[in-house]
Image (cartoon, grey):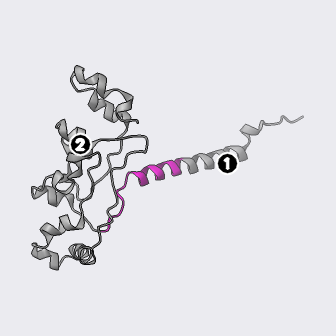
Amino acid sequence: MSKLIPWYLQPWFRITLGIVVLILLGGAVGGIYLTQQSPPQPIQFPHNFHVGAGIPCLYCHPGAQWGESAGLPSSSLCWGCHQQVAKTKTSPELQKLAQYVERGEEIPWVPVFIQPDFVHFNHRAHVAAGVACETCHGDMKKMTVAQPIPRQNMGWCLNCHSKQPKEKWARLSDCSLCHY
């Protein structure tokens, strides 16, 4: 009398399970890859060139000093400098800027650093506390294209908050500070 092999030891089950695991792993790796890439922008903006030229972050992102959101530069802000730059007439990317200005349209920038809906990050509070932009956004002098920080999560934020003086720690570790 032959023994029956349990279903979970059958070759067809093992092959099917292996295929399912490979599909799930591939989806997870692909999802992680896609969420860590910078979205395509309407105009290529070389952060390393602009920061290297000495333009401070707050010039293009003034909202960081006065509000919760840093904001993205308006076409008129960009044009204020680029209308005086000779390369504007020959650069295809800067010609795109000129077209937005001529049409009276804002540049439809795609945000790179996006917090989940349940997190409220206040730029103004961090700027007022003297936190350098590079602390959260990385060294833009080394980035042609702004790249999201891969592990910008609650543990990452709390790690920085925990380094603050003890008298500030109670307030900085209060959940309602960021989750309201």
33 left or right, relative to 124: right
Question: At which x and y percent is residue 178?
Answer: 36, 35
Q: Is residue 32 magenta?
A: yes
Foreground pick, 110 / 63: 63
**In what element is the residue under mark 2?**
helix
Q: Where's the N terminus, which quadrant?
A: top right
Foreground pick, 169 / 63: 63
Reading the image, the residue beneath label 1 is 16
Foreground pick, 38 / 58: 58
Q: Residues within 10 Å of mark 2 (few under 14, many from 20)?
A: some
> Which residue occupies 27% across, 30% down?
161
> Which residue occupies 62% across, 46% down?
18
The disc labelled 1 sits on which kind of residue? Thr
The disc labelled 2 sits on which kind of residue? Arg
How many numbered circles does the render carry? 2
Depth check, mark 1 against mark 2: the one in front is 2
99 left or right, relative to 27: left
Q: Give above or below for 167 relative to 117.
A: above
Q: Give the main secondary structure, helix, strand or loop, of the magenta stretch.
A: helix
The residue segment tinted magenta is 25-42
Q: Residues within 10 Å of mark 1 (few under 14, many from 20)?
A: few
Q: Give above or below for 57 relative to 110.
A: above
Question: At which x and y percent is residue 29?
Answer: 47, 49
Task: Tell me which label, 1 or 2, sits earlier in the chain.
Answer: 1
Question: At which x and y percent is residue 107?
Answer: 29, 67
Q: Where's the C terminus, which quadrant?
A: top left
Q: How far is disc 1 from disc 2 in space, using C-alphas?
A: 53 Å
- Residues at badges 1 and 2 in contact (C-beta under 8 Å)? no
Reading the image, the residue beneath label 2 is 124
Q: Is residue 34 magenta?
A: yes
**In what element is the residue under mark 1?**
helix
